[in-house]
Image: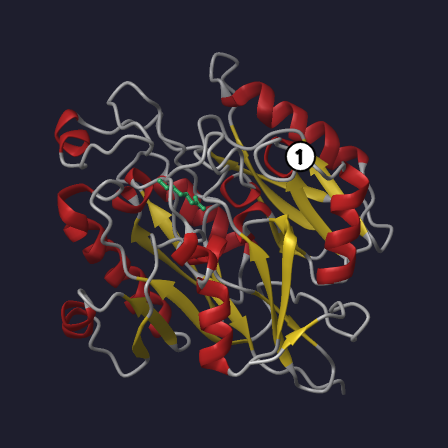
Amino acid sequence: MTTLTTTPRADGFRMPAEWESHSQTWMVWPERPDNWRLGGKPAQAAFTAVARAIAEFEPVTVGVSAGQYENACERLTHANIRVVEITTDDAWVRDTGPTFVTNNSGEVRGVDWAFNAWGGLNGGLYANWVRDDQVARKILQIEGCARYRTDELILEGGSIHVDGEGTLITTEECLLNPNRNPHLNREQIEQYLADHLTIDTVIWLPDGLFNDETDGHVDNFCCYVRPGEVLLAWTDDANDPNYPRCQAAMRVLESVRDAKGRQLIVHKMPIPGPLYASDEECAGVDLVAGTQERDPSIRLAGSYVNFLIVNGGIIAPKFDDPKDAEAEAILRRLFPEHRVVMVPGREILLGGGNIHCITQQQPGPQIAG
Ligand code: KQY
């Protein structure tokens, strides 16, 4: 595998929007017992349902440890699902996998951001993340894609959303957090995004969703639905800790112009719940010092915005919540050309994220017409 010392922008590559065509989606099999209850068995069932839902639209590759290889192969039998052995620390390939970039001559490459488990020893979610930091490189090796590595910039894929036309949305809470890149200021981080994803405008929301373990990943809070239109998690309840976060995000989104000079159209998506883990669910997680505390009093950062766009489909979480039906109706209205599939998301939420966080789309080759 080639590791390049140039930048994607200099080489004519950009990050496509999620709705542009994919060659496949990547996932990683969950098993870590200090993050997933009951040795990961309920999560494995939930991930299997997500993989099968995506596989109705496009191929899926699932990375799995040697110890779980046979089990995963048995559970993931599907003509459109491939299982490959990859050693990881956990299963969040949105954050550990590469961000794929494409050019106009059909080449696909990957950006391998440095990874520190969402904050390293300063609030990160586990103490050894060496294997997770290798996931992007391993995927690019398997796919035969050239690699750009940013040893000097820590970034997770869930902290960014792009419109494929030069605009990126992120949060200050995450990208400016001192536990990621304390040596870089806002302008320097913007320059990395400009050089590695071919971005001209960065939209900075102040915060992500309340209690998000990732320090406010944007993919749990606000996403693009098409160029010039975003979907924002929303509450009208002034007593909800998300209320000031939603208000602040709306103020930014209503005031900015994107890279093409457009004012954004902002759609609202209700927030489910409030959702909490039960005593029983918390008791099923192994206790290990330094990992995320699980307690029934801690509000879960549940969000319908944490969905994946696939070729012709939307794979979105549902929570057995009264707002599920409204969320599905909003997605159907916003994506009339896609088939919306709602998949149970609670087990994934108990681990700290949802469908977008556990998937990574690989764009197909693009040839300029
Ligand atoms: O992207 C994400 N939501 C990752 C969350 C990691 C949680 C680990 N407990």
Q: Looking at the image, is 361 positioned above or below residue 331? A: below
Residue that appears at 28% across and 68% down: 52
Q: Is residue 257 left or right of residue 352?
A: right
Secondary structure state at the residue bearing disc 1 = loop
From the top left corner, tell me how far across and down residue 273 is, in percent.
Answer: 35, 28
| Quadrant of picture, ligand 1 | top left
Residue located at (78% from left, 56% from top): 194
Residue 168, x across and y down, in percent: 70, 51
Residue 171 at x, y = what percent?
64, 37
Can residue 209 be seen by looking at this rendering? yes
Dividing the image into 4 quarters, which one contains the N terminus? bottom right
Q: What type is the residue that disc 1 sits on?
A: Pro
For label 1, the residue is 182
Q: Is residue 114 above or below residue 232?
A: below
Where is residue 307 drawn, in percent x and y?
Answer: 45, 52
Q: In which quadrant of the rendered view does residue 187 lie? A: top right
Q: Is residue 56 visible?
A: no
Residue at image point 35% right, 30% down: 300
The front one of 249 and 322 is 249
